[in-house]
Image (spheres, grey):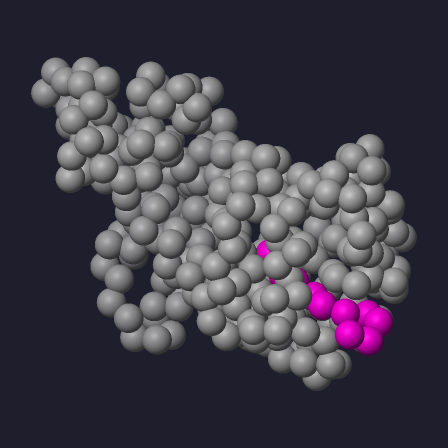
Amino acid sequence: MANIAFIGLGNMGGPMAANLVKAGHKVTAFDLVAASRDQAKADGAGIAESGVASVKDADTVVTMLPAGKHVLSVWSEVVPAMKKGALIIDCSTIDVASAKEAHALAAKHGMASVDAPVSGGTVGAKAATLTFMCGGEDKAFAAAKPVLEKMGKKLVHCGAAGAGQAAKICNNMILAISMIGVGEAFALGEKLGLSHQALFDVASTSSGQCWALTTYCPVPGPVPTSPANNGYKPGFASALMVKDLTLAQDAANSTGAATPLGKHAQEIYKAFDAAGNGGVDFSGIIQHVRALAGK
């Protein structure tokens, strides 16, 4: 049993911390939101008075925070307070530059570190089936594995510091583009008189097959577990997809990469978000696609 500090107990962090408790680890948690702290306590975690207090005796520290500025702020406070030889893992989705800066901060204080953003959404967080995309030194990744394996089913060491974040934003750019394409296909099929099931049966076993179709189909019926069958309740909210697409565009601009479809996907999701749909699952983008036909 390891002593683990967990900072950031939101929709993803809360269930992840709970799974560490279920695995038999001693978890000391902290979040600025009282309701999140209360839920973590109910799940069996100890609650610290602050982030710094949570890390005092921790072998491993896990952070799950909204953005790079939050990660750097928290790490600048807690890393100096960590015990010698401890490991710090960030599971947030942030920009690559901030991830590298966080790694440098940890190294300055002699701490091993891993950036390990996740894929799998709130369902994966609760079921401990997340995919972790990891960046950092080999020894740090090896040390992080026993902790991450209790929260997910697949771990990929993508490379050096920041590589996990790079993989995450590239993956989610693919996902956003794919979901818009699937939504457009179903919207066109509706106009042509195709049933949702007929199009699904063809595309899911043909060259149009993709995860956005077969696992997260954006129309009710063909995939009973998709958010389309639950009023597009997230899942993975559209506002978070805007965040990830913006991170991808920032990275593209800074490196000189050409991502025209990624840029257009960002514009489409930003418009959907601006129309008040930030809390709708990202597969609900089909509603935006349908609305465009009326303009």
Which residue, as the protein is rendered here, is positioned at the far left?
192
Which residue, as the protein is rendered here, is positioned at the far bottom?
108
Q: How many marks?
A: 0
Q: In the rendered view, does 194 fall on the left or right side of 144?
A: left
Name the residue: 44% across, 40% down: 238
Which residues are the magenta region? 82-91
Q: Please name whichever residue, 141 or 177, is drawn nearer the observer in this view of the structure.
A: 141
Residue 20 picture location, percent across and down: 72, 45
Residue 7 picture location, percent across and down: 74, 54
Q: In the rendered view, does 236 fall on the left or right side of 170?
A: right
Tell me: residue 81, above or below residue 54: below
Q: Is residue 32 magenta?
A: no
Tell me: residue 150, above or below residue 192: below
Name the residue: 24% across, 67% down: 258
Tell me: residue 238, above or below residue 3: above
Residue 128 visible in the snapshot: yes
Name the residue: 46% across, 20% down: 230
Residue 122 picture location, percent across and down: 56, 37
Q: Please name whichever residue, 212 or 186, is drawn nearer the observer in this view of the structure.
A: 212
Q: Please name whichever residue, 69 or 213, is drawn nearer the observer in this view of the structure.
A: 213
Q: Quadrant of the C terminus?
A: top left
Residue 65 visible in the snapshot: no
Q: Main secondary structure of the magenta part?
A: loop
Name the residue: 27% across, 40% down: 210
The image quadrant that residue 102 belongs to is bottom right
Residue 76 picture location, percent across and down: 73, 72
The image quadrant that residue 77 belongs to is bottom right
The image quadrant that residue 57 belongs to is bottom right
